[in-house]
Amino acid sequence: MIWRGIELCCPACRSDLDESGGAEPEFRCRSCQLRFPVILGIPDLRVFSDPYIDVESDRAKGRKLAERFDDLDFAGLVEHYYRETPAVTAAQARAFT
């Protein structure tokens, strides 16, 4: 499928996706039936969690970051991100930025 000018397919089996509208839009694979939500206008096509944060926690963190988007510049958003990441020390945050 073409979504906003980008060709997308199921990341698990490479089959076509169908988009469903509604309050919480998502994509559904025609073949394997996996479902992928659209979070803050971005399709979340992950098939497994990151080793450092589970999918739901990562989505919640993204939503918190988006709440500050109009208030902070890019550097401020990066700083806010690391303040919301207790596993990263202040020294690590400085090195990562």
Image: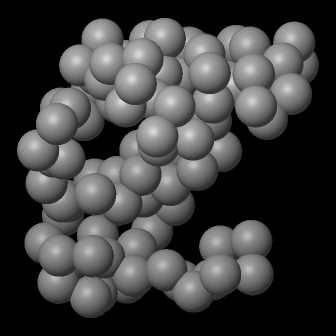
State whether residue 84 is above or below residue 76. Answer: above
The answer to which quarter of the image holds residue 61 is: top left
Location of residue 66 in the rendering, given as x and y in whole percent from the top left corner: 67, 23
Location of residue 86 in the rendering, given as x and y in whole percent from the top left corner: 30, 11
Query: In the displayed structure, does residue 74 sit left or right of residue 42?
Result: right
Q: How many marks?
A: 0
Location of residue 51 in the rendering, given as x and y in whole percent from the top left corner: 11, 44
Query: In the displayed structure, does residue 86 sit left or right of residue 8?
Result: left
The answer to which quarter of the image holds residue 87 is: top left
Residue drawn at 31 percent across, 76 percent down: 10
Q: Nearer the viewer, residue 21 or 66?
A: 66
Location of the N terminus by quadrant is bottom right
Location of residue 4 in the rendering, given as x and y in whole percent from the top left corner: 74, 71
State whether residue 81 is above or below residue 10. Answer: above
Location of the C terminus by quadrant is top right
Q: From where the camera sits, is residue 18 visible?
A: yes
Residue drawn at 50 percent across, 55 percent down: 43
Task: Indicate the colouring scheme.
Answer: one colour
Q: From where the camera sits, is residue 30 visible?
A: no
Residue drawn at 19 percent across, 47 percent down: 50
Query: In the displayed structure, does residue 53 sit left or right of residue 60?
Result: left
Q: Nearer the viewer, residue 65 or 87?
A: 87
State whether residue 30 is above or below residue 28. Answer: below
Q: Nearer the viewer, residue 73 or 36?
A: 73
Residue drawn at 32 percent across, 18 percent down: 89
Query: In the displayed structure, does residue 38 sit left or right of residue 75?
Result: left
The answer to which quarter of the image holds residue 55 is: top left
